[in-house]
Image (spheres, rainbow, N blue to C red):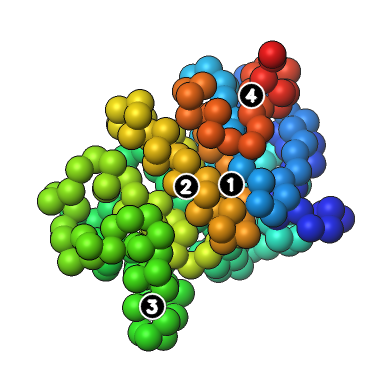
Amino acid sequence: MAAEGAVLRLENLSKRYRRDRPPIFEHLSLELKRGEYLAIMGESGVGKSTLLNLLAGLDEPDAGRVWLEGVDLYALDDDARTLLRRRAVGFVFQAFHVLPYLTVEQNVALPLQLAGAPETQRAQRTADTLAAVGLAASAKAFPRELSGGEVQRIAIARALVHRPRLVLADEPTGNLDPRTAVQTLTLLRDQIKANAGAGVLITHSRAAADTADRILVLDASGLRPLPA
């Protein structure tokens, strides 16, 4: 049973890609509560992005369980997982993945449109979210007309507009200069908390990780606190 009040809980999670190879990781356990923003660091190849995919229900673990909002993610079929993910999870990626042929506000409104939200709700929620990330004046602009930091803020707004309980960010500022990266991640953290959600940041950068409430390191021994 998932802990009461936990947005996300992992129990003995294990994953391998080939039976003749060692597991990428095994026996990972973790609990993330509402309002908590966690950074996970680790060397390339230790499975950080694989772990993020498992947290989102995009891959299948070999063992262990993941609960999202008290729901056993891998007890659901694919369609039910997709619906839960669409409602409860927001994603921010390093490559932004904004759509160049849509305006800023159209990009941000897309999750609400996919969820079937009424037009009036979409308009208000999109406007509120753009204001929160400082892009209200750019609502009618196209991504190509904005800076890299502003485009990443579009991605953040899109991840937050449906007020997900869990935000997953995979190296979201790897293409930004250090100052803009820290400003962007601080904005992401503050908005996650303002929406009463929880967040997981995957990063190689200690400066990026320092914007989180706590930092864990993923390596061959599992998840452990960052050494002092």
Find disc 1 in the rendering and name its residue. Answer: 199
Of the numbered discs 3 and 2, the one sitting upstream in the chain is 3
As measured in the structure, the alpha-carbon distance from the residue carrying label 3 to the one carrying label 1 is 24 Å
- Is residue 26 depicted above or below 65 in this figure? above
Find disc 4 in the rendering and name its residue. Answer: 218
Of the numbered discs 3 and 1, the one sitting upstream in the chain is 3
Secondary structure at badge 4 equals: strand
Q: Are marks 3 and 4 in contact (CB under 8 Å)?
A: no
Q: Are marks 3 and 2 in contact (CB under 8 Å)?
A: no
Q: Is residue 189 visible?
A: yes
Mark 4 is on which residue type? Leu
Q: Residue 163 or 52: which is nearer the viewer? A: 163
Q: Quadrant of residue 120?
A: bottom left
* Foreground disc of the pair 3, 4: 3
Of the numbered discs 4 and 1, the one sitting upstream in the chain is 1
How far across and how far down the image is residue 125, in percent?
42, 73
186 with respect to 124 (left or right): right
Secondary structure at badge 2 equals: helix
Mark 2 is on which residue type? Leu
Mark 1 is on which residue type? Gly
Q: Where residue 188 is drawn, which disc sits there? A: 2
Q: Residues within 10 Å of mark 2 (few under 14, many from 20)?
A: many
Q: Where residue 160 is drawn, which disc sits there? A: none
Q: Residue 7 or 222: which is nearer the viewer? A: 7
Q: Do the residues labelled 4 and 1 touch (CB within 8 Å)?
A: no
- Is residue 107 depicted above or below 115 in this figure? above
Find disc 3 in the rendering and name its residue. Answer: 124
Q: Are marks 3 and 1 in contact (CB under 8 Å)?
A: no
* Foreground disc of the pair 2, 4: 2
